[in-house]
Image: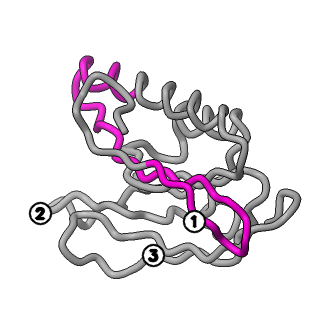
Amino acid sequence: MQLGEWDVPNIRAVVSVDRERLVLYDVHLPMPLSLNSHAEQRLQIHNLLERAAGEDDPVLIAGDFNFTETTTHHDAFKNAGFRSAWDTLRRGRGETWRRPGSLNVLPGLRLDHVMVTDGISLARIDRGEREGSDHWPMIVEFSMGEGQGR
């Protein structure tokens, strides 16, 4: 699934969980290192939220968003009805990426997120072991059900 002009792989799947349908998006949004990549990131976020708004079933979006929880991009997901799994269940930075090399002593950033809509009840989120990537994975336990859940 393509969200913007760049050919970046993203996945949309509809799965059955507890006999209910769940729309799952796995995304890797561009890192805003230039004006061009920032514009592409904004375009992909807009298109992703527009697609998600058209879904009839609960939506879970996970992946490398390449923005932190303190940005207007994060606010756009909240304004569209999404809850951050980390912000709902945990406190603190929740870093998923740290600059490699000598600067790795600095605090890391949470660039990876799990966002959910109503109809998904969150139970647990943890950071997994970093293997084969420069990011730590986020491990989320959830269930399907009526209402907002936790």
Q: Earlier in the sequence, mark 1 or mark 2?
A: 1
Q: Residue at x 28, y 76 (%)?
A: 130
Q: CA distance from mark 1 to mark 3?
A: 12 Å
Establish if 65 lies above or below 51: below
Q: Which residue matches tag 2?
A: 101
Q: Quadrant of the C terminus?
A: bottom right
Instruction: Inspect the image, locate mark 3, and give the three-letter code of the amino acid beneath it.
Output: Arg
Instruction: Inspect the image, locate mark 1, and give the three-letter code of the amino acid beneath it.
Output: Gly
SS at badge 3: strand
Establish if 117 lies above or below 17: above
Percent coordinates x, y for residue 87 in the rendering:
65, 59
Q: Magenta stretch: give its range.
A: 12-41
Q: Residue at x 22, y 57 (%)?
A: 99
Q: CA distance from mark 2 to mark 3?
A: 21 Å
Q: Which residue matches tag 1?
A: 92
Q: Residue at x 34, y 25 (%)?
A: 4
User: Residue 24 lies in magenta, yes or no?
Assistant: yes
Q: Which residue matches tag 3?
A: 127
Percent coordinates x, y for residue 21 in the rendering:
68, 59
Establish if 42 lies above or below 14: above
Q: Residue at x 24, y 18 (%)?
A: 36
Percent coordinates x, y for residue 83 in the rendering:
69, 51
